[in-house]
Every structure is written in structure tokens, then in C-alpha cells.
């Protein structure tokens, strides 16, 4: 976000959430999936093997995956929800941003974000530091 807001970045790769937050704040930015396709990240839930209240944890998971809750989370976080029907429970601003971000057949061209190989993190951090220093 600081690259766009403070450091003159004109184009970049980013998740939709930060840019959507900036648009909501009135910043002159936009986000659109490329015509070739975009990376998609879907978070999941994890359950500790030692959890004592398994039924309550699953009840909480069930709650979180309700479209109404997914819509609220999407609105507050500015990240799009992967829960079917959650878009019916977002604000008009979020619906408009989603539609403009994924026009036409863009949703059919989403690619699941692949796992990073073990060597990648150190290389990415090295270049991120060089970018910050520059």
C-alpha cells in the first residue's frame, strides 16, 4: 500500500484487499484481474489435534462459512469472500468494486496460488529488503 500511496508506484501485483481499502479511503487507485488470469488465495481452517471442544470448534467453523458472515467479513476486511452467496451480504461499494475487479470471464481464469518452494522465502525477503532500501 505504501508503494502506491507514498512512493509513486504506478503498477504492481497485489491482492485485492489492500487496493480495495485504498479505494474506499478515496485514494486514486484501482484493481483489475489481468485478462490472462489472476492468482487466487483461499484460506482454510485448522483444528488442533489436542482440542477439547471439537463440537464447538466445528460449530464456529459452520458459523464462519455462512454467506451472511462471509459478506460481513469481506466488507470489514476488503478481501473478497470465497463463500458462495457472501456477495449478497456486502455493501454496494464492495459489490461494485468486485464487479469492476473481475469483469467478464475473469473469475473462470483464477489460478490457485501454488505453494512456495523452500528456497523462495529467503530470496523474496532479500529482494524486499533491497526494494525498501532503494
Image: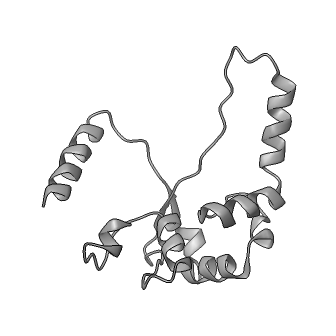
Q: Position of residue 34 (x, y in %)?
A: 43, 76
Q: Position of residue 102 (x, y in %)?
A: 56, 77
Look at the picture and state if 50 lies above or below 102. above
Left or right of 20 in this view: 120: left
Look at the picture and state if 98 lies above or below 130. below
Name the residue nearer the viewer: 73 or 2: 2
So how many labels did they put on this image? 0
Left or right of 30 in this view: 57: right
Left or right of 64 in this view: 130: left
Name the residue nearer the viewer: 109 or 30: 30
Q: Residue at x 66, y 81 (%)?
A: 93
Q: Residue at x 68, y 17 (%)?
A: 49
Q: Position of residue 13 (x, y in %)?
A: 36, 67
Look at the picture and state if 86 lies above or below 130. below
- Quarter of the image with the C terminus in it: bottom left
Q: Position of residue 12 (x, y in %)?
A: 32, 71
Q: How is the image coloured?
A: one colour
Q: Residue at x 80, y 72 (%)?
A: 88
- Quarter of the image with the N terminus in it: bottom left
Amino acid at each position: 500500500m505504501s508503494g502506491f500511496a507514498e512512493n509513486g508506484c504506478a503498477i504492481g501485483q497485489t491482492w485485492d484487499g489492500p487496493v480495495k481499502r485504498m479505494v474506499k479511503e478515496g485514494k486514486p487507485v484501482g484493481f483489475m484481474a489481468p485478462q490472462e488470469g489472476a492468482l487466487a488465495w483461499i484460506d482454510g481452517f485448522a483444528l488442533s489435534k489436542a482440542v477439547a471442544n471439537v463440537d464447538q470448534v466445528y460449530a464456529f467453523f459452520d458459523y464462519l462459512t455462512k454467506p451472511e458472515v462471509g459478506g460481513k467479513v469481506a466488507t470489514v476486511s476488503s478481501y473478497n469472500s470465497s463463500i458462495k452467496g457472501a456477495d449478497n451480504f456486502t455493501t454496494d461499494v464492495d459489490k461494485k468494486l468486485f464487479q469492476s475487479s473481475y469483469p467478464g470471464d475473469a473469475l473462470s481464469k483464477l489460478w490457485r496460488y501454488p505453494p512456495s518452494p523452500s528456497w523462495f522465502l529467503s530470496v523474496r525477503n532479500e529482494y524486499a529488503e533491497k526494494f525498501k532500501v532503494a
